Image (cartoon, rainbow, N blue to C red):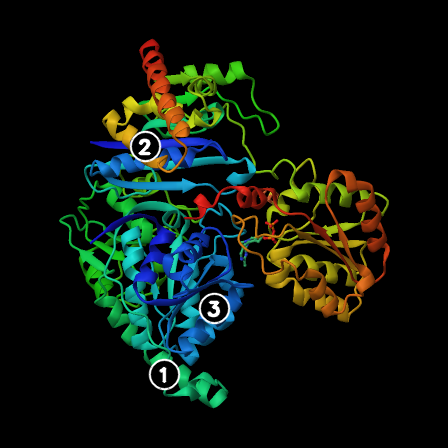
Amino acid sequence: MKRDVILAGVGGQGLLSVAAVIGEAAIARGFFLKQVEVHGMAQRGGSVTSHLRFSDRPVYSDLVPDGEADLVLALEILEGLRYVHLLSPTGTLVTSTAAVKNMPGYPPEETIRAAVCAVPRHVLVDAPRLAEKAGSAQSANVVLLGAAAPFFGLPQDSLVGAIKRAFAGRAPAVLEANLAAFRLGLEAGEDGATKT
Amino acid sequence: MPTKLLLGDEAVAQGAIDAGLSGAYAYPGTPSTEITEYVEKSPQAREGLIRSFWSANEKTAVEAALGMSYAGKRAMASMKHVGLNVAADPFINAAITGTSGGLIVNAADDPSMHSSQNEQDSRLYTEIALVPCLEPSNQQEAYDMVSYAFDLSERFRVPVLLRLVTRLAHSRAPVTLRTRREQNRARLPDDPERFIILPPTARRQYAALVARQEDFVRESERSPFNHLADGPDASLGIVASGIGANYVLEAFAGEVPHPFLKIGQYPLPALLVDRLFHRCERILVVEEGYPYIEAKLRGLPERRSPQILGRMSGELPRTGELTPALVARALGRRAGAGIPPSSVPVPRPPSLCPGCPHADTFRALTEALGTFPETARVFSDIGCYTLGAYPPFSAIHTCVEMGASITMAKGAADAGIGPVVSVIGDSTFAHSGMTGLLDAVLDRSPITVVILDNLAVAMTGGQRSCATGRLEAICTGLGVEPAHVREIVPVPKEHEKNVAVLREEIRYAGPSVVIARRECLQTARRAKRPAREGA
Ligand SMILES: Cc1ncc(C[n+]2csc(CCOP(=O)(O)OP(=O)(O)O)c2C)c(N)n1
Ligand code: SF4
């Protein structure tokens, strides 16, 4: 059992928190793990990525080798597309529909959607809307985590447990919203996955 | 033994804390910053048991660490690779005086220049300093090497360089911790004369250092971090260091079929190299950064010299960081063929945060310069404000290395072009702008230095700036006329006023300073948030 995951997004979207939750869940299950953060100038709205690898055998390279990722999890739709070449032929792109247009020349949304749909296995999730529905606009990252949950090869309750630990010490309402976000994401992911 | 999930940087910090560290000194710089941030937040530092300090620059950091070593305690100084240029003088001379308490210099290299001006390789500095170097390949080694390096330093009385690279510094993995060692007690050196390196002492000390080189090689030969594993297929031998070794293991899923020499400690272990040379006709060198090992192997006067492959021979690219795919290909392994890249994504360049004070300063400066001849030049420096190079500002003409804004402006003014403005952040000014301003004052150079005081080292995540609250005193103290040390507040509603102030000072025929003061939005936001984050 081995999973190579690329997380992609824009500074401030909570990408590294999602990576931490997955990593924690994997470690709790006794997997070997390595997780690279690329957050260069993220606070200024640039791209952020993380390579997350876990396996029941030792993990050597910190970076996911090109063409071997099982999953690209994207909190921003253009950022997801930026890394599809890292996916293995059977890998899946799970991406939010969120578009952060903070630079010139952001491609038209139809062009981006068409390119996403050209990826053989993809799941598109309206994370911002589901996050609102869950009761916290900030929980879009956890919606995506829910949508991608079936691809990690980790039991759901270990992810839920990791979310609970991540939000321990925060207001109970914050945890509730995030657990709701996870569930909504999970449902949306299952719907999206069956369609494609 | 407990395990902890740690970044490579954090593993170095935790390793030092557990190895009896007494002082951590640093100037921030990606990808090294998290070392000192981790020490700073540790219970030991908070209780005052370990001194953790953001120094004015890398040179002062290494000097403070040497001072602590002089007093018998274990100390380290951390920096990014280019920081070692600034600290090269104390680093190299500390090898001559020798150390007393263990002294480690952590230098984090940034191959591919993710956030740097160059990709220089810190290992080369140990060739000048003639000291050992350690290079971890994973977080556990990073942790273990620190304790080992303190011992090495104390045994041989030399500073030791610990070299990291971006991908390890910023990669997390579980690390098994060891029992904590006691700190050293303060103790004055019993041979204090070696710290006064006047020529007679210096010559003696240098000769002793040169004489120790053989010992360093022997240490490398029996180091737990250098390891030669035999493999059945001797048609190729592999030498790999640091994270390069990980990529080799990755390519073979952990089972390397070739003789494989993994390097984690320098100077190179001659004996192990020799053994490999006798076994293989061809050797591939996999190392992050410069072809340092490769060049050494090529230059060895061996009886049998195998063919050496690597970055110099084109098996691997000469520039940029290694990737698992590049290494797999060099080893003749097929790299995964994935999904074709999408042509849709356009680059998302970093930009100033919306509302950043630097943006207001650049708008005012550009307008102020509008009434001057087009030969007006803005010499900039390094920090968030370097993003003023990009549209919509396109407001600066240079960015070279820390402090160069003021001194290059001076030189350009000497050449007769003008008007000449220098733009420098508060932390960069404290790092290496002050001495340049003194030059300008002494020569009455007609330059205007705009100090962008956002009360933080914003670029690297908002560390404390050494200049906060002191800029006016420093500038007037260096001799800038008090009437020509002005303050502006970079907010939109002060725009006209700011343009006027800048214009007056640019027109002034001597050295002048305009301090644009408003806090970085990010540090202001973090300060408002509840203390939870700091834990
Ligand atoms: C010798 C050296 N040390 C460290 C760095 C990394 N670095 C670049 S700019 C900078 C400081 C930026 O602070 P400041 O001048 O206050 O500007 P700000 O980012 O706050 O706008 C640092 C730490 C470097 N490039 N070179
Ligand atoms: S981090 Fe601070 S100084 Fe840097 S761009 Fe953002 S607001 Fe400006």
Q: Which residue is mark 2?
A: A164
Mark yes or no: residue B138 visible: no
Q: Marks 2 and 3: in contact by CB < 8 Å?
A: no
Name the image quarter holding residue B419: bottom right
Q: Nearer the viewer, mark 1 or mark 3?
A: 3
Q: Is residue B30 left or right of residue A165?
A: right
Q: How many marks?
A: 3
Q: Position of residue B329 (x, y in %)?
A: 31, 39
Q: Do the residues marked 1 and 3 share a common chain?
A: yes
Number of other residues with Cα within 10 Å of mark 1, as a class: few under 14, some 14 to 19, many 20 or more = few
Q: Which residue is mark 3?
A: B62
Q: Secondary structure at mark 1?
A: helix
Q: Which residue is mark 1?
A: B208
Q: Position of residue A33 (x, y in %)?
A: 27, 40
Please give the name of the residue rendered at 55% of the width and 43% of the height, measured from the top-left corner: B528
- N-term mark: 1 or 3: 3
What chain does badge 2 belong to? Answer: A
What chain does badge 1 belong to? Answer: B
Mark 3 residue type: Val
